[in-house]
Amino acid sequence: MQNKGFVKVFAVLLTLVCLFYLSFSIVTNKYYKEAKIHAAGDMVKESQYLDSLSTKKVWLGYTLKKCRTMELNLGLDLKGGMNVIMEINVADVLRSLANNSTDPKFNEALANARARQAKSQKDYISLFVEEYKKLDSGARLSALFSTTLREKISPQSSDDEVISVLRSELKSTIDNSFNVLRTRIDRFGVVAPNIQQMETDGRISIELPGIKEPERVRTLLQGSANLEFWETFEESEIHNSLIQANAIVKDILAAEKEKAPVAEGPAEKTVAGEKAKEVAENTTAVTDSAKQASLEADSLLAELHDTAADDSTKDQSVEMWKKNYPLFSLLNMDPQQAIQGPIVGRVNYRDTATVNAYLNMRQVKDVLDRKLVFKWSVKGVGEKEDFYELYALKASVRGGKAALEGDVVVDAKDDFSQHSAKFAEVSMTMNSEGAKKWARLTKENIGKCVAIVLDNNVYSSPRVNDEIPNGRSNITGNFSPEEAKDLANVLKSGKMSAPARIIQEDVVGPSLGQEAINEGFISFLCALLLLMVYLMVMYGFKPGIIANGALLLNLFFTMGVLASFHAVLTLSGIAGIVLALAIAVDANVLIYERIKEELRGGKAIKKAVEEGYKKAFSAIFDSNLTSILTGVILWYFGTGPIRGFATTLIIGIIISFFTAVFLTRLTYETFMDKGKLLNLTFTTNWTKNFLVNPTFNFLKQNKKAYTISAVITLICLSALIFRGLNQGIDFTGGRNYVVRFEQDINTVQAQEMLNPLFPEHVPSVITIGTPNQVRISTNYKITDASEGIDEEITTKLYEGLKPLLKEGTTYEQFTQDYIMSSQKVGPSIADDIKKGAFWAVTFAILGIGLYILLRFRDLSYSVGTVVALIAGDAIFILGMYAILWGFVPFSLEVDQTFIGAVLTALGYSVNDKVVIFDRVREYTHLYPKRDKYSLFNEALNSTLDRTFNTSVSTLLVLIVIFIFAGDAIRSFSFAMILGTIGGTLSSLFVAAPIAYEIQHRKQLKLENKS
């Protein structure tokens, strides 16, 4: 083998990279276990424990926080959580940009474009323009949008210029929404969230691991952004009030600590209550207490400095400090020193709730300015970023609100500062109304700060230097380019024309996720063991061990590469890894069968191994490339679990090519050069005579094979036409709920209980997994995007199923303990999934056919492949699903996962056909004068042992997945089983015979001409 040095170096480097990235998962798992032991089941304590270690350097100079971002993450189906796809309604954006025009043609064009979008590949703006021109061919787009966008569009602007501006504004709106959603998620406190913009205009995918309050998340994500400009207080202006507030808090806490209940029945009171009342009513005492606090501060601060060397005394002094200054100690501020600026404190994130509670006490509010409003910074500060700044804002006289709303902002952009090349600045432009208010606001606050607030969090508080009369402002503040970009996005979010709404949602409970992990691990382990045993049984112990070593390396490298890409491992991803291992076995089978042929031809073992690898290379390369092509199409058109499957499949196939073709060959040559492994036969007592030189006349059965294939195809097509497929909510839109009860459930009875609560939308109830677990599907009010609709539906489920629940079960217990997972797919995304599925299957078949044509340079191979893929694979799988759904004890719903299975089956089926055609091509070159009939029959027979071994090993893997991997991918594995059977038979009796017929007729024509 050439380039041995390169293979060795690459293998070592790949091993080191994989070890590096996988090591983070090992380290973090160690700390996760420690956190669980420390917390003893308390999730809050567990989270706090991990947070406390977040900045500790735990591995190779990396902090625990960084290690957690580098680890191999588990998908929601394995660890529980929530996944949503949010969409910004582009039509609403255009309405806003057109100042909510009432022009009937404009609104009709919007509606027509929306209707066409479900069936078109064009973007919404292009469709809108086409529809608007249909209704009024002479209309100018500038007439619609020049009012709102006068700075960018004039009445004389061409349609192309307007379209360019609209695209820019839409992108800006999507970016703004993305920024707002990202910030909201960060504030929600989710560990390792994943938020990404999707290719489709206006869609954002969000994964939130470990979420247990989906209703709160829905409310958080779907609210409109609220940008405001607030006047501020200087801390020095309210410093004395804060001293008084501290004294009140001190007295209340002291009273609470000394409380002693007086047992007098209903009249029972506490000393704390009396003390609190006394503090609230006696303002003179408050003032005196504040003065006393001022005097005590000097002595206590001095004491803290004087006792720095004595730890025990220092600890006592710190406790005394916290006791006397409960508010200032949390604010980390000196009560003796007033400061400039609106920041009144920097508070550890754990103490923010306590500070809020102190400042919201009625007695405290009484001593603070009525215009004073406190708000937190949006981001943490300090080395650990675990302290949040508290700002003192000044409410306007009218209603206690901000001085200026953010909808007056027309544009904002970041740029490098004119005064410093190191820092960036943000320029902001307001409309005419906003410019007037902004001029008055800046004039009245020269020398003070104006706070920019989004979603009740302060993003920035620039100081006003001069009055700004024209609405154009430059905001400076030593911003980095990233900080300036974020602030510009915040300012632009004030004109968000349409809030994002959830159009697809999946919620998986942690217990169901743990079951998925267990099932996935069991199926994976069993499949791997079966593959390893099968190889040793078929080819002998030593060849089997070498091939199995390659499989284990394949697994190690695949996991390492996934970790290096920061990919998320899902249950579908595990299936992809297992299937990739099966494809790796296919490569080993091809090589070993070739070596056996060379040995039977009388060649020495070293030469047989060399020739075996050389002759198997082209077939392995072609089959793997077609499988990768299918995986790429899956990834491009799929979402969620399908992409997870496609990612692991593609990586696994590439790694398997390296391990099976190069590493195993390097192993054989290394040992054989040392005089070892020279007596191998690549057979065992059970397999040495199995399918040796078979002489089946496959082509003799052509007519019979065509007839049987045609009958099966007609039956499948009839079932598809007259019975149809059991479409899941991915294609119809709707909601799924997996509900687990404490006893076995009669699904008919459960459905009858729910029917009265869901008029005209009868829910489907089927058993899934175990007899006590059902899945309820409904499309009731699926188009309703109003707030609280999800809670309304779960309430109906609760009311309907109440007789089946444990007595006394509350609604909250039902949603937390009984609903194991939920899924929602809106109509718009269901249409897109159907469209994507159609194009995915179409492009997969055409792409494979084109590749076969380019690779073999003969149309007959492409025709045979495409016909076999359509009739023998795709229609066969679809037809069997149409025939069997409702008659088998597991779900045969057609959803995204099913489409992924069909595409994978097509890619896998091509492997058989490529191997056969590769052998035909080889024999054609070796025996150019031999007739086509003999060539095809000999090629089919010589590859029959490979076809058998690959099909059996793959079926073993799929059967294991089907049995052990759970309901989440049972339908997937069943489709793959059908695909493997159909694909194998179609290779032997459809693809090869059709290719033969075309080549034979072509040969006859040439002979007749001559």
Image (cartoon, helix red, strand yellow):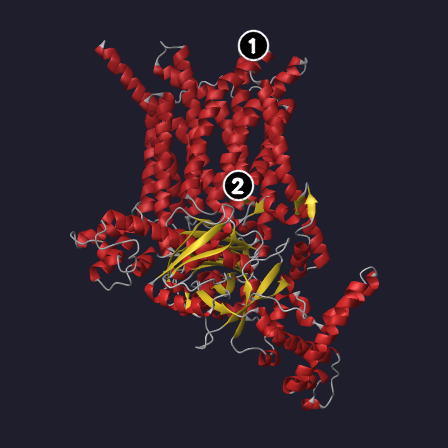
Quadrant for the N terminus in the image:
top right
Residue 911 picture location, percent across and down: 45, 28
Q: In the rendered view, does 978 fall on the left or right side of 613?
A: left
The residue singled out by tag 1 in the image is 603
Question: Can residue 679 be seen from the camera position used here?
Answer: no
Total numbered labels placed on residues in the image = 2
Amino acid type for the residue under numbered disc 2: Ala
Amino acid type for the residue under numbered disc 1: Lys
The residue singled out by tag 2 in the image is 575
Q: Residue at x 70, y 59 (%)?
A: 39
Q: Residue at x 62, y 21 (%)?
A: 667
Q: Is residue 57 above or below residue 685?
A: below
SS label for mark 2: helix
- Quarter residue 660 falls in: top right
Residue 790 picture location, percent across and down: 45, 64
| Tags 1 and 2 touching, CB below 8 Å | no
Along the polypeptide, which appears first: circle 1 or circle 2? 2
Residue lying farthest to the left in this orientation: 138
Who is closer to the viewer here, 435 or 103?
435
Residue 102 picture location, percent across and down: 24, 64
Q: In the rendered view, does 517 fall on the left or right side of 992?
A: right
Who is closer to the viewer here, 401 or 939?
401
